[in-house]
Every structure is written in C-alpha cells, then in structure tokens.
Image (tube, helix red, strand yellow):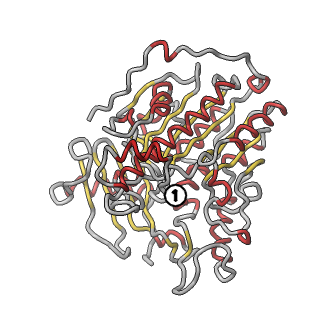
Amino acid sequence: MRFLLPFFPVACLILITPAISRAQDVSRPNVLLIISDDQAWGDYSFLGHPHIRTPHLDKLAGESLTYTRGYVASPLCRPSLASIFSGKYAHQHGITGNDPRIPPGKKRGRSNPELKPLYETIMDRIDDDPGLAHILGQVGYLSLQTGKWWEGDPKKRGGFTHAMTHGDPKRGGRHGDAGLRVSRQGIKPITDFITEAKEQEKPFFIWHAPFLPHTPHNPPARLFEKYRKKSDSKFVARYWAMCEWFDETCGELLAHLDKEGLRKNTVVLYVTDNGWIQSADSGRYAPRSKRSPNEGGIRTPIMIRWPGKVVQKFDEQTLVSSIDLAPTILKACGLKVPPTMDGIDLRDRAALGKRNAVFGAAYDHDIHDVSKPNLSVQTRFVVTGDWKLLSHHQGAAQARPAELYNLSVDPAETKNLAARHPGKVQQLRATLDTWWAGPETAP
C-alpha cells in the first residue's frame, strides 16, 4: 500500500529564522527525542488515516528522513523505552516486563515494602551500561527527562541533569509520576529547561515521552466532539481525539524551537513506544496491538530531522528499529557508539540496506523471575523483506505454532503461511537463533 504525504503549499514551507542564539554556536547539536505512547503506526494523516488529523507531525514527516517500516524492540512500554534509552534489546538489558510477578493479594507498585527489592533489581539494570543521558552528559550536555520513565530517579539512575519525574517510591508513582503531566498541562518545564541551557551555553538532550495518546483518554471537549461525529464508538472517538491532542502538543514544542532559533542546530527524532488498536467496546486496547508482536503492537514510523544535515525522504521500504535511535543520536553528536549497542545510524542508508532484518521479542507483562528475566519471553519475531516470522516460545503460557506472514500482500497478518512454506520458517528461525536463541528453559 502506498502512503501519501500531504501537499504543503510552498508558502507554508518558507521559514523565517530568528537570529542565531548562543546555544547554536556550540560544536554539538541539541537533541529532541519525541516518544509517542500507545499509538498505532498508521494513526496519522500523513500515513493515510481517513479520520485522524495530525498536521504538525505531518509537517515534521515532510521535513524529515521518515521511515514507515520502523519497529520497536518490544511491544510493551517499559522494555521498549529501556531499549530506546540503552540501544539494547530487552534480552540484553534485562528489563523485560513492566513489573515483577505480583503474589496474590499483594498491591502492585514500588511503594510496597515487600516488593521493593524486586523493583530495585529491575531498576538497577538501567545503569549496567551507560545510556543516552549518561554518555551525552560526559561531554557537557544538559539533559531533561519528561513524561514516561520507569527506572526510578532519572538523575541518579538515568544520568539526566534535569528531570520532571521524582522517582521516590514513598511518594507513589510507578512509571513517571509528576513527569506524566507534561504536555497534558503544558510544556513550561521544557521551555524553562531550554532557557537554562541557552543561558549556560550548553547543548541539550530532551527525552520527551508525554503520556499521550495513552489512557486516560480525556481529550479536550472540542476534539472529542469533532471525532464523535466520525465514529459510532465513543471509545474510538476519544482515542482519535487523543491522537490529535498529542499532535497539537508536538506542534507547540516544535514551534518553540523555531521561536528560539534552534531549528537548524537541533536534531529532532520521533518514535512510538508501542502500538495500540482501540477497542470499540471499551477503553482498552484490542487484540493484536499493545503487548502483541503483530504489526499493531510493534510497528511505528521513525523520523529524524536535522536541517542541512539530513536530506528529507519518505522511505517505505527500509527496515529500521528503535534500537537505531541511540547510535544515531550519539553519532550525530560526534560521539563513539558503545559496542553494547547493536543499532545502525539512521542516516547511514547503505548500512541499513545491508542489514536486511529487524528483530524483537514480546514478554509477559509481569516478570516471572527478576533474576532470570528472559524466562518470561513469549514470542521472538523477525522481519526481513516482505516476510515476518513469529516464533512462540514453547514454554510460554499460550504456546502455539509458528506464524509466517507475507506483509506485502497481507499487512494485517490474517493468513498464516507457515504450513505452506516450512522451508521459509526454518530459514527465518535460523536467522532468529543467530540473533538470539532465547532462554534454555521456560518459566
């Protein structure tokens, strides 16, 4: 299927650039990483959605190297975000679920003293290897965490110099606490941070993971009313409205960069942490989306905008991964990529073309054994060319035969071709095993 970029009148693309700020004089670029939360990969007007309007992200896509065949390393927020930050797959960083397995009758959350050691074991893993904020901080970057962040205090564990999330389990909060207010209640913490970075004449890195369009789906009334006319389901209408609300907040942030004269020397990157298909009957997600290794759970557009440095292109063929974001950022900032990061610079199209495949895995929501986190794996997946293999772990609770799909003719994954192409299944399973063979035993 061909996706069409919207037509932008020439007048809309003429930019009036303010005087160059002192922050633009530094030798390294600023970095803004925008991470959407629980959004289907096609739920943008630039990707052809018939109802959802996303004019600001459409514009960003039209100014970026935009890959439509992007994939996250895991279809659940916490392991996915950890992969984006660390540049490693979940089986490498060890954060494979949102929580440790909760005993019957026990309260979920880090504030439970009986469970605190289990949560601490998971959070400790974010510091096993330096992540984005750690590495950038070593060369003088100021860094701000906003929005979703699971791994405790972003300053102590994540290496951020500034953070909205407090990370104190005694004050409650499980996956972002105070940081989740960003964008829903404005972007002043971000604009204040940018002002401080300019005053200190230092480059900045912003981890912007607003809780949007994530539940609660409570969009402004004007947007809900707009989409209620387009859907028979109030739940779908609310979700569609959330997507446009998120787009509006992105537009506000990008406009601030322009206002401050930071467009030219700021690398803007975009990804979604995991997919979401809205149920028409409830406020929850439908099957084959969030937590699923199907396209609805793992596919995402991935963009990089850097005026004068990255040529705009709309790429519908090249396979890219969320683990590519960290090495892309580090190389753009003139830094070496640690050997623990397996991703490829998104600007290196020759290297991307040679890779031929992307990988990932889906795990149980709750980690069975925090000392052996990979035992919770449900499914490993590989996408190569038009083919996709889902290899379900034989020890998983819902183990089932392998699934093979030809995405070029069946993007919705409705026809399992595994029985018709056993040779292809064998070939792709060998490719998967070369990447990661999975744990030796099941939970």
Please name whichever residue, 421 or 373, is drawn nearer the observer in this view of the structure: 373
- How many numbered discs, if any? 1
x and y, in percent, of residue 244 in the image: 46, 41
Please give the name of the residue rendered at 26% of the width and 67% of the height, measured from the top-left corner.
Answer: 401
Pointer 1: residues within 10 angstroms few (<14), some, or many (20+)?
many
Above or below for 40 versus 55: below
Where does label 1 land, which residue? Answer: 77
Quarter of the image with the N terminus in it: top left
Taking 272 as reference, is 123 above or below it?
below
Q: Residue at x 41, y 58 (%)?
A: 290
Residue at image point 60% right, 54% down? 148
| Label 1 secondary element | helix
Residue 328 sits in quarter: top right
Where residue 32 appears, as percent x and y from the top left, is 63, 37
Say whether residue 383 is left or right of residue 187: left
Q: Is residue 315 above or below residue 152?
A: above
